[in-house]
Structures are given as structure tokens and as C-alpha cells.
Image (cartoon, rainbow, N blue to C red):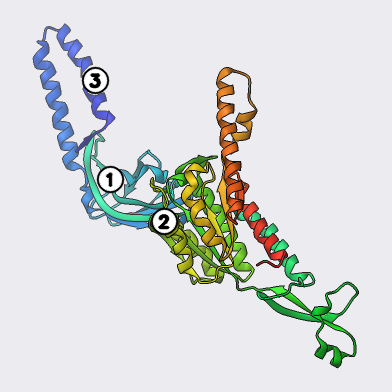
């Protein structure tokens, strides 16, 4: 049972007759007790007259998946039993689902059903769940009613937002330009025959096709293009450094954005993309999926992964890379590049990977470091500027150490990192190295 504001108002109205009767010589206590007894009786009768909320049949309609930050409308269909149900309903979503705090009013005639819309705005990746709804059925007087919890399980899988997809059209246009231009001439293994064309001054004579020359009657040249079935492995570090805040989110979210943009671009280029998210255990793995099915598989695998407050085992992480494919052409490692002292494990294991493939080491950096380092207005700002400059210097030292280990460091703010890695991938394509 529950009480409404009308009950308090009814009890308060008893002050008026109490004052009048007391002025007429009536004893105050009997009058007060009599009024309270009347109020209790009305409340009890009103609650007993309310429909039983347990007679409601609840059906929930939800989309199975939604991107983080996108509004979604949940639906509750409520069917009344033999009696009319008038009252309120509240859906028991967890706070990060962004459900409204206010209860929705319902008035359902007997035997009919009504739709209650529950707008949601997810604020966290992963599975968001609601296990039940709470229904309050009012009595005829509106003083009290019955309250009941009704089980109605439902869940939504919240996927990464993939905000970096805005950069995809321009990068795809550049990729088409690479495919449409005269094919890059590169010698050695790892190239595919593209076409024949006439020799012009300045061409490499080693690319002349003598059989085609004999058939055509003019000097013909073979042109080559980079292979389209390269293996691109993306390794996302989910250890403690991925929990650091950069910009408006954590580093792991920025790594996911970079991975999704690169994967979308690489699969359009005809390359095979593999993903592993690792710290000391595999948190997500996607392999053996190409084409249009790749991005849905990636976002679904990433959805529930959260940073783990443990140090990453880099020997085991790179073993996972080798397990995905025996011949990776490009390995993109998305992790932190803060200080060489905290990255000793990474730097010690990196040479074993760079001997097998071209390695890009990407890291999202704080957006405000350069601005903080430029402020000198007060003593507090000077101390903060010194800390920011120390962080920037450590990052530069680590980037140099990564270069000595045979890899290539790519850094940027959470907004800049995805397109920078995509641009580096296109540059490697244009140079015939992928």
C-alpha cells in the first residue's frame, strides 16, 4: 500500500472542524482522534478498492542494440485484467541507462492495453538491464492504493559510438584515388600484377615484359599494385593505462574509435582485419570476418570491455597477435605512451614483433597538456605547467624509444588519433609497403 498527497491534505483539513468544535466547548482530544480514525478508515477503504496491480500483463519492446549516446525509446505494453487500473508505472532501469526519474501516469480500462514509452539515453557501454517495473494502482478517492513489483526483464546492448566514422568518406576517397591512379611500381615479393602499358622514358627497364613486347610490336611494361589481402592486426591494451582519462572519456574509448576507423578503411581496401583486446587475458577477439559483417562484429565485441586495473603482459599480448595470423603485414598497438619507465615491458617485447611486421604504436594523449604548459599566470599555474611539460617530455622520450625498437609512434588527442592512424595506413599503401 502507498499514500498520496491527498491523504496529507485530508488530515490537514481536520484542523478546521477541530478549531470550530474546540471553540464550541468540545474536548480537543476526542475530536482529534475521531478525525484521525475517519481518515484511516477512508484510506483503508480506498486502498482496498484499488485494482490489484498483479493482474496487469506487461510486455516489453526494446531494440537489441544501440550506439552510446543515441536516444532510444523503450516500450511497455500494459494489459489490464477484469478491472480498470488507474495509477502510475516506473521502469526500473539502472541509472546509466538515462531513464526519466518521473513516473508515467496510466489509465487502462478493463481488458484493454496501453502503451507507455520510456525514453532512454545510455551513458555507458555494455549491457544495460531492467529486471522489473513497479506499478501503483490508485483507489477511487485517490488517497491511497496498491503497489506491486512485476517482473519484466529486458536488456539493451550499448555499442561504441564510432564517432570517428565522420572521417571515413574522405579516407575512402583517397583510397579510391590510390586504386585509380597508375599502379605503383614496386619490385620484389608482396606485389600483384596489375596491367600492361607502353614504356616511357624514365621507367624501370627491369619491368619490361618481353613476351608482351613481341606480341604488341612496341615496348610493353608491367605495372604492379600492392596486394589487397594483407593481414592487419589491431591490438588494444585494456590494462590500467587504458583507464586514464583523456579528453571527455578514457583512453580505451579513444583506442576503440581508432580501431573502428582503421578496420572500416582496411576492409574496404580488401585487407583482412583481426582484433584482440588484451591485458593479462583476452577480453575480446574478432578474426576470420571480412566485408560488411566486420564492423558489427567489432562493435559487438568491444561493447562490454572495460579497463582492468592491472599491468599488461606484453609477451602474452604479442603471442596473441602471432596466434591470430602467421604473417601480419601491419600490427597496430593502441596503448599509452606516457613514460619509458612504465613501458619497459612493452619496449622489451616490441623488437620481437617488429622483425615480423610493420608496427604502429598509437596512443591518445590529453587534449589540454599544451595549453596547461603555456600558462604562467600564478604559482599554481606554474606548477601545473611544469607537470605538463614533464609529461610531454616523457612522451617524447618514449616515442624515441619506440622508434629505436623498430616501431612507429603515432600520438594525438582522442579526436585526432583515429584519422592520423588511418592516414598512416594510406601512406603505407601509397608507398607500396602494404
Q: Residue at x 24, y 25 (%)?
A: 8
User: For the residue labelled by badge 2, is the local secondary structure a helix, a strand or a loop?
Assistant: strand
The kind of secondary structure element at disc 1 is strand
Question: Is residue 172 visible in this depiction of the protein?
Answer: yes
Q: Report which residue position mark 3 lands on.
A: 12
Mark 1 neighbour density, 10 Å: few (under 14) some (14–19) many (20 or more): some
- Quadrant of residue 101 within the rendered picture: top left
Give 137 or 164, whichever is nearer the viewer: 164
Q: Earlier in the sequence, mark 3 or mark 2?
A: 3
Is residue 161 among what the camera can see? Answer: no
Mark pair 3, 2: CA separation: 49 Å
Q: Quadrant of residue 143?
A: top left
Figure quadrant of the N terminus: top left
Within-10-Å neighbours for mark 3: few <14, some 14–19, many 20+: few
Direction from residue 307 to residue 205 in the image, left or right: right
Quadrant into which the C terminus falls: bottom right
Q: Where is residue 95? Give x, y as percent.
A: 37, 42
Q: Residue at x 42, y 43 (%)?
A: 98
In this rendering, is residue 297 above or below 153? below
Of badges 1 and 3, nearer the viewer stands 1
Q: Secondary structure at mark 3?
A: helix
Residue 142 at what x, y percent from top left?
26, 35
Which circle marks residue 157 in the picture?
2
Q: Mark 1 sits on what residue?
A: 134
Whichever of labels 1 and 2 marks the residue nearer the N terminus, that label is 1
Q: Are marks 1 and 3 in contact (CB under 8 Å)?
A: no
Looking at the image, residue 396 lies above or below residue 378: below
Identify the disc placed on residue 316.
none
**144 sits left or right of 96 in the view:** left
Amino acid at each position: 500500500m502507498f499514500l498520496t498527497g491527498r491523504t496529507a491534505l485530508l488530515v490537514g483539513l481536520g484542523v478546521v472542524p477541530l478549531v470550530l468544535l474546540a471553540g464550541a466547548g468540545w474536548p480537543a482530544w476526542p475530536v482529534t482522534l475521531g478525525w484521525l480514525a475517519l481518515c484511516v478508515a477512508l484510506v483503508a477503504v480506498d486502498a482496498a478498492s484499488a485494482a490489484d496491480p498483479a493482474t496487469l500483463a506487461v510486455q516489453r519492446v526494446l531494440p537489441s542494440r544501440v550506439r552510446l549516446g543515441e536516444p532510444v525509446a523503450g516500450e511497455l505494453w500494459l494489459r489490464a485484467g477484469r478491472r480498470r487500473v488507474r495509477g502510475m508505472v516506473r521502469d526500473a532501469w539502472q541509472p546509466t541507462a538515462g531513464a526519466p526519474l518521473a513516473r508515467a501516469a496510466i489509465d487502462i480500462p478493463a481488458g484493454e492495453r496501453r502503451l507507455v514509452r520510456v525514453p532512454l539515453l545510455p551513458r555507458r557501454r555494455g549491457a544495460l538491464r531492467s529486471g522489473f517495473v513497479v506499478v501503483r494502482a490508485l483507489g477511487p478517492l485517490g488517497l491511497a492504493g496498491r503497489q506491486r513489483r512485476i517482473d519484466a526483464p529486458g536488456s539493451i546492448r550499448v555499442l561504441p559510438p564510432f564517432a570517428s566514422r565522420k572521417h571515413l568518406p574522405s579516407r575512402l576517397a583517397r583510397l579510391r584515388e590510390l586504386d585509380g591512379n597508375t599502379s605503383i611500381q614496386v619490385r620484389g615479393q608482396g606485389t600483384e600484377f596489375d596491367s600492361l602499358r607502353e614504356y616511357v622514358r624514365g621507367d624501370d627497364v627491369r619491368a619490361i615484359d618481353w613476351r608482351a613486347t613481341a606480341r604488341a610490336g612496341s615496348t610493353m611494361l608491367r605495372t604492379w599494385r600492392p596486394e589487397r589481402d594483407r593481414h592487419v592486426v589491431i591490438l588494444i591494451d585494456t590494462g590500467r593505462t587504458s583507464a586514464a582519462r583523456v579528453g571527455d572519456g578514457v583512453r580505451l574509448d579513444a583506442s576503440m574509435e581508432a580501431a573502428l576507423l582503421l578496420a572500416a578503411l582496411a576492409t574496404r581496401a580488401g585487407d583482412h582485419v583481426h582484433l584482440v583486446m588484451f591485458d593479462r587475458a583476452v577480453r575480446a577477439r574478432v578474426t576470420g570476418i571480412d566485408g560488411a559483417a566486420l564492423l558489427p562484429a567489432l562493435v559487438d565485441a568491444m561493447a562490454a570491455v572495460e579497463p582492468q586495473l592491472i599491468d599488461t603482459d606484453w609477451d602474452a599480448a604479442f603471442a596473441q597477435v602471432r596466434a591470430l595470423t602467421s604473417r601480419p603485414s601491419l600490427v597496430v598497438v593502441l596503448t599509452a605512451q606516457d613514460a619509458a619507465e612504465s613501458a619497459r615491458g612493452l619496449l622489451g617485447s616490441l623488437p620481437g614483433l617488429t622483425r615480423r611486421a610493420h608496427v604502429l604504436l598509437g596512443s591518445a594523449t590529453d587534449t589540454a597538456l599544451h595549453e596547461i604548459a603555456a600558462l604562467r599566470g600564478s604559482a599554481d599555474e606554474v606548477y601545473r605547467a611544469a607537470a605538463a611539460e614533464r609529461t610531454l617530455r616523457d612522451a617524447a622520450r618514449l616515442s624515441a624509444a619506440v622508434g629505436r625498437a623498430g616501431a612507429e609512434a603515432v600520438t594525438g588527442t582522442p579526436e585526432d588519433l583515429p584519422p592520423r592512424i588511418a592516414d598512416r595506413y594510406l601512406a603505407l599503401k601509397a608507398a607500396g609497403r602494404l
